Amino acid sequence: TGNAKRVTCNGKEENRKCGIRKPMKYEFDFERLEVYQLALEFVDEIFTILKKASRDIQFSVSDQLRRASLSITNNIAEGSGKATPKEKIQFYGFAINSARECIPMLTLCLKQH
């Protein structure tokens, strides 16, 4: 992960969201991965959408959608620490599958909104 991309804004290492301008301090190398940063933004959006969702959605898919979205970031983090390319690919595949799992639930939430 030595060639991992950093999330930058205006040439400085910063959070991606507009209005938040605190410098990022990385503790783990996976935190430098652009895909990890994007996955974190996705999870944040999921949580925001679910806060506004109807009670029916909150009780039916909310927990599963939260878990699936969190699984994306968790598998990216875990996969980045694996020793072999085969193990990394396996966990990155889990992350992709978790993203796919989110699509039908997110689509339903957005239709109901």
Image: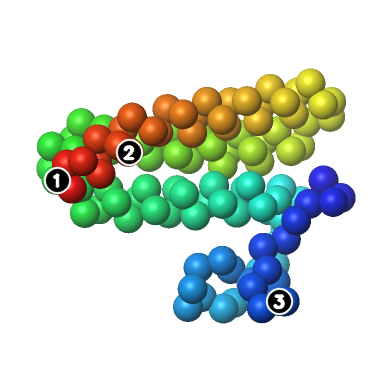
According to the picture, the residue beneath numbered tag 3 turns out to be 12
In this image, 86 relative to 105: left or right? right
- Where disc 3 sits, the SS reads strand
According to the picture, the residue beneath numbered tag 2 turns out to be 106
Q: Is residue 48 above or below residue 83?
A: below
Give residue 55's position: percent from left, percent from top.
13, 42
| Pointer 1 with pointer 3, Cβ within 8 A | no
- Say which quarter of the image contains residue 67: top left
Amino acid type assigned to the residue bearing label 2 in the image: Leu
Residue at horizontal 24 percent and vertical 35 percent from the top: 108
Residues at marks 1 and 3, CA–CA distance in whole angstroms: 39 Å
Q: In front here: 9 or 44? A: 9
Q: Is residue 40 above or below residue 103?
A: below
Residues at marks 1 and 2, CA–CA distance in whole angstroms: 13 Å
Give residue 44's position: percent from left, percent from top.
43, 54
Residues at marks 2 and 3, CA–CA distance in whole angstroms: 33 Å
Mark 2 Cα shell of 10 Å, populated few (<14), some (14-19), many (≥20): some
Q: Which disc is residue 54 wearing?
A: 1
Mark 1 Cα shell of 10 Å, populated few (<14), some (14-19), many (≥20): few
- Where disc 2 sits, the SS reads helix
Give residue 26's position: percent from left, percent from top.
71, 61
Q: Earlier in the sequence, mark 1 or mark 3?
A: 3
Q: In front here: 29 or 111? A: 111
